[in-house]
Image (tube, grey):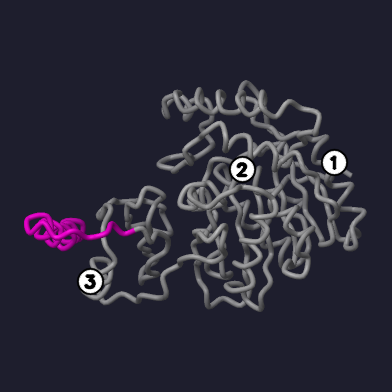
């Protein structure tokens, strides 16, 4: 019998006993990194409360527990003599409710905060994180109204800034972090740095776009919802054929509603008042039959604002003609190298295909 079979027996026999005895137990809602173990294996939970065994090196995923309880996880860890650090739970409070986050390699001396895009989740960083995790402490939250933080409302700039500020103050090393955002996440980190520069070491913003205030928010939010609904009807094999370089395999998404789309649009319509920290603005310029390229004019606009900031001399605005909007799923190793180069040395990897836009 293999390890998978043993894990199945150990995890399901107690559940069968519970069901037979009709003992009511509250489903486990704690999700995230539950244990970092030897041989580069980790116990994680997806946004659907399903535990997985993940190889950090290969990113292969095997489901072995579903909707289960903390004592079973602890039992598995004890049986296999694995370490069991503090469970990555909640930090920050939105209307009395906590925001979910993953905390990886908390003993590292420097913290990087990774912010996902619209209708995605913290699992969207599962290809990038293994390349950063050996050196950095990673904080990877689910934004309000997204995935495991879906009950945390509202998704506004003020509430999100408050939640992220509390997360950094209580969890980050020395109470500061390098902040990285992709797509919607880029707008989140830019607005956060404007509000709380004292908590930020540097800003990495990829895939920013401009949504001017004169757009009809109601009409646009319904259009956003409709496009997303159509995208989800497209079979995965078709997406793989159209975008073979992007890896979206088994990537959880957030339930899409018109009200959430409205809040996302309202969030992205706001232009940060300032860029007080050194900022790297990136535009992924590869388009084609499927228009997955970022808006270069929007990147230049935000790059010029960053150049006018108090650390503007060190800020940069660049593009990469070979990368698509979701390039964290296209070349996660390159994404991680660019994050590290910017965090450590304030450098852009020009020899890797990046070109200045300003």
Residue at image x 66%, y 23%? 219
Mark 3 Cα-neighbour bin, 10 Å: few <14, some 14–19, many ≥20: few
Expressed as whole percent of the image width and height from the top left, the position of residue 147 reads 47, 47
Q: Earlier in the sequence, mark 1 or mark 3?
A: 3
Q: Secondary structure at mark 1?
A: helix
Contact between labelled residues 2 and 3, with CB atoms less than 8 Å apart: no
Which segment is the magenta one? 1-28
Residue at image x 80%, y 33%? 212
State the quadrant of the N terminus.
bottom left
Q: Is residue 339 magenta?
A: no
Mark 1 Cα-neighbour bin, 10 Å: few <14, some 14–19, many ≥20: many
Expressed as whole percent of the image width and height from the top left, the position of residue 53 reads 32, 57
Q: Which residue is mark 2?
A: 327
| The quadrant where residue 131 appears | bottom right
Which circle, 3 or 2, is nearer the viewer? 3
Residue 247's label in the rendered image is none
Residue at image x 66%, y 61%? 162
Work out how far the residue at label 1 is from the one at label 3, CA to CA, in angstroms.
53 Å
Q: Is residue 190 left or right of residue 84?
A: right
Q: Which residue is at the front of the view, 25 or 292?
A: 25
Q: Which residue is mark 3?
A: 75
Q: Which residue is at the front of the view, 169 or 288?
A: 169
Contact between labelled residues 3 and 1, with CB atoms less than 8 Å apart: no
Expressed as whole percent of the image width and height from the top left, the position of residue 92 reads 57, 64
Q: Which residue occupies the extreme left position in the image?
A: 20
Work out how far the residue at label 2 is from the one at label 1, CA to CA, in angstroms.
19 Å
Q: Is residue 45 left or right of residue 231?
A: left
């Amino acid at each position: 019998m293999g390890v998978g079979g043993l894990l199945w027996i150990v995890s399901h026999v107690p559940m069968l006993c519970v069901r037979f005895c009709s003992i009511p137990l509250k489903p486990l809602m704690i999700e995230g990194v539950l244990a970092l173990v030897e041989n580069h294996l980790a116990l994680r939970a997806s946004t659907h409360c399903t535990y997985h065994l993940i190889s950090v090196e290969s990113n292969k995923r095997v489901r072995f527990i579903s909707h289960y309880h903390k004592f079973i996880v602890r039992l598995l860890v004890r049986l296999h003599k694995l370490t069991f650090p503090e469970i990555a739970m909640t930090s920050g409070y939105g209307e009395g409710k906590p925001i979910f986050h993953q905390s990886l390699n908390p003993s590292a001396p420097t913290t990087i905060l990774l912010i996902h895009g619209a209708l995605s989740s913290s699992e969207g960083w599962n290809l990038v994180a293994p390349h950063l995790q050996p050196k950095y402490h990673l904080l990877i939250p689910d934004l309000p109204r997204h995935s495991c933080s879906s009950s945390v409302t509202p998704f506004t700039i003020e509430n999100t800034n408050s939640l992220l500020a509390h997360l950094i103050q209580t969890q980050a090393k020395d109470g500061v972090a390098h902040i990285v955002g992709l797509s919607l996440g880029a707008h989140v980190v830019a607005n956060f740095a404007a509000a709380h520069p004292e908590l930020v070491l540097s800003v990495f913003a990829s895939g920013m776009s401009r949504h001017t205030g004169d757009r009809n928010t109601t009409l646009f939010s319904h259009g956003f919802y409709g496009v997303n609904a159509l995208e989800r009807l497209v079979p995965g094999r078709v997406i793989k054929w159209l975008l073979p370089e992007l890896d979206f395999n088994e990537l959880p998404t957030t339930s899409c509603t018109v009200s959430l789309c409205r809040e996302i649009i309202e969030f992205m319509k706001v232009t940060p008042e300032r860029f007080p920290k050194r900022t790297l603005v990136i535009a992924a310029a590869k388009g084609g039959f499927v228009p997955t390229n970022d808006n270069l004019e929007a990147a230049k606009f935000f790059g010029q604002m960053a150049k006018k900031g108090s650390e503007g001399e060190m800020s940069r605005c660049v593009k990469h003609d070979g990368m698509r909007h979701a390039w964290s799923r296209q070349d996660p190793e390159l994404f991680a190298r660019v994050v590290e180069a910017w965090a450590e040395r304030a450098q852009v990897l020009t020899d890797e295909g990046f070109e200045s836009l300003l």
